Image (cartoon, rainbow, N blue to C red):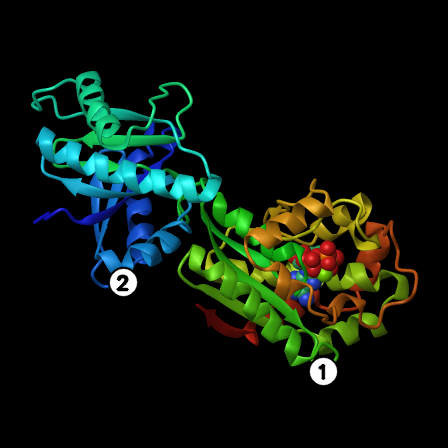
Amino acid sequence: MFDNPRVIVLRFGELFLKGGNRAFFEQRLQKNVKRAVATLPEAKVHKLHARVLVEVPEELAERALERLGLVFGVISLSPARVVPKEIDALSAEAVRFAQEAAAKHVSATGKRPTFKVETKRSDKRFPMASPEISRLVGGHIHQATELPVDVHHPDIEVGIEIGPERAFVYAERIPGPGGLPVGVTGKVNLLISGGIDSPCAGWLAMKRGCTLIATYFHSFPYTGDRTKEKVIELLKWLAPWQGQIELFVVHFTDVQKALRENGPAELAVVLYRRMMIRTAAEISRRERALALVTGENLGQVASQTLENLAVIEEAAKIPVFRPLLTNDKLETIALAKRIHTYETSIQPYEDCCSLFVPEHPATKARLEDVLRAEARHDVAAMAAMLADNAERIVVR
Ligand code: ATP
Ligand code: MG
């Protein structure tokens, strides 16, 4: 079956391997790995003890590596090769890997690298012990390359793993995204705007194992369809981390006008936000999402004072998570760049919360004033109507 194939070794955090959730987490991770390479039909996923091995044809290795780098729960990845379980074959492959890694190191740094060999043998039937294997193979590499050994801080670490089923060799450990496998903690509803923050908040929720759905409040024609396209574009960057994302576009204009016409102008932003939260919670109930996620941050803008956040959250029947709450803007921008949403987010767009808004919105809205303004409407019915009429778009 294994004729020296190209494989990618995925390692996941030991922490979540402990306790009663282990099997569940492992299954989910494996499922997510399969999904990540589903469009590479020849890729095969094998489960090993505390590892997942993805076997790919040579020419697909780069693409597979790229996609597998988007699987939360993976702490590191190594391009590797499966080798027959006998010492000469292992050694020859290790020499090849060392030569390849050394050439890369030289072209990147102009310096000759040091190396060491690290062996893990969990198949105790294999006739040699790990240190003995490392020493022998290290000798062969040294002979072939004349590279110096450094057991403490090597530039290159050649890994040999000899498991009960198969043995493999690698020389590179690429950091994975970490976190928990998407799906293990449950479903949440991301309130997404066209800005920098909300896509980052959604990414962080996925990193913590949440499956995302998303809700966007659209105020056509005041916010143009370009803004809706922008939101879809942002979700396209998030989708590969979980497969696909269902987006609910809420047509918000008429309700905004009604709230604005029947309430004090300075409360408009808070009234809009409460209606957003209420509607998103209603969509969540229907879609079995258990919490809302926003890109809110303390103190950035008038609508994000502690007083206003409290009054806004009062309208939610489910928890509201704000993963960016304590970030500096620069930290969020760095994250947005890393997940590729930044370039899209900084395109100009209209913000529906700035619609029909006075120059000086309340920074310390009082709940009693807000409730009095809302008493003129059947806000629950409005939220249900908005949820009924939301447009559902699957983003891949
Ligand atoms: P962002 O960069 O995400 O737009 P922001 O710093 O501009 O955030 P606000 O515009 O006050 O802050 O929005 C705060 C949060 O409210 C957003 O992160 C998002 O979660 C939610 N939100 C704002 N506008 C919308 C909208 N039109 N549809 C859905 N959610 C929204
Ligand atoms: Mg915004």
Residue 210 located left or right of residue 67: right
Q: Which residue is mark 1?
A: 221
User: Is residue 396 in sight in this rendering?
Assistant: yes
The label on residue 40 is 2
Q: Amino acid at mark 2?
A: Leu
Task: Name the front one of labels 1 and 2.
Answer: 2
Q: Amino acid at mark 1?
A: Pro
**Who's the residue at 42% across and 22% down the image?**
153
The one of 65 and 21 positioned closer to us in this rendering: 65
Q: Quadrant of ligand 2?
A: bottom right
The label on residue 367 is none
Query: Which part of the image, by quadrant, shows the C terminus?
Result: bottom left
Distance Cα–Cα, label 1 vs label 2: 42 Å
Q: Quadrant of residue 221?
A: bottom right
The one of 391 and 329 positioned closer to us in this rendering: 329
Judge whether 328 appears above or below 143 on screen: below
SS under mark 2:
loop
Residue 310 located left or right of residue 168: right
Pointer 1 or 2: first along the chain? 2
Judge whether 153 appears above or below 296 on screen: above
Badge 2 local density, few (<14 within 10 Å), some, or many (20+)? some
**Who's the residue at 74% across and 69% down the image?**
352
Residue 117 located left or right of residue 387: left
Residue 54, given in percent of the width and then of the height, sits at 25, 49
Judge whether 33 appears above or below 89 on screen: below
The one of 214 and 371 positioned closer to us in this rendering: 214
| Residue positioned most to the right | 360
**Who's the residue at 72% across and 43% down the image?**
328
